[in-house]
Amino acid sequence: KGDNGKIGVIGGCLEYTGAPYFAAISALKVGADLVHIFCAMSAGPVIKTMSPELIVHPYLPETADMNQKDARTASQAADAVERWFSRMDVLVIGPGLGRDPFILA
């Protein structure tokens, strides 16, 4: 796994779960071996149900999550995603990211 490409898709919020899914599934259909989606916490469970072939990381907190005890700061979320960058051949940034100010920070 990984010889034909490892793709990272950064995107997806509760309102827009289809955009990162279609970007990721398209990468698989054209031959990529592994596709990771880094999305908002609220979008993770939804995207995971769309395809077992996708690796979903619900690391990005939204403003609504900030009242929860386990919410991450913007820098912690960025660190969680950034540690994967060296393993990716390509990054796709933005499909379905939404307009949440905390994610855009």
Image: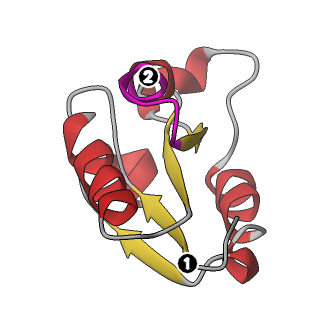
Q: In the shown orientation, is residue 17 left or right of residue 10?
A: left
Distance between the alpha carbons at the discs numbered 2 and 1: 35 Å
Callout 2 crowding tier (Cα within 10 Å): few <14, some 14–19, many ≥20: few
Q: Nearer the viewer, residue 36 or 43?
A: 36
**Nearer the observer, 57 or 6:** 6
Whether residue 96 is visible, yes or no, is no
Q: Given the image, on which type of amino acid does mark 1 rest?
A: Gly
> Closer to the observer: label 2 or label 1?
1
The residue that appears at 23% across and 49% down in the rendered structure is 22
Percent coordinates x, y for residue 21 in the rendering: 31, 43
Among the two numbered marks 2 and 1 on one chain, the one whose residue lies closer to the N terminus: 1
Q: Is residue 37 left or right of residue 21?
A: right
Determine whether, in the image, residue 62 is placed left or right of residue 24.
right
Residue 46: in magenta span: no
Q: Which residues are magenta?
A: 47-54
- Above/below status of 59 relative to 2: above
Work out whether residue 10 can be spotted: yes
Q: Position of residue 88 (x, y in %)?
A: 63, 77
Q: Residue 28: image x %, image y %? A: 39, 59
Q: Which mark is residue 5?
A: 1
SS at mark 2? helix
Residue drawn at x 78%, y 68% is: 83
What's the mark number on residue 64? 2
Of 17 and 24, the residue lying toward us: 24
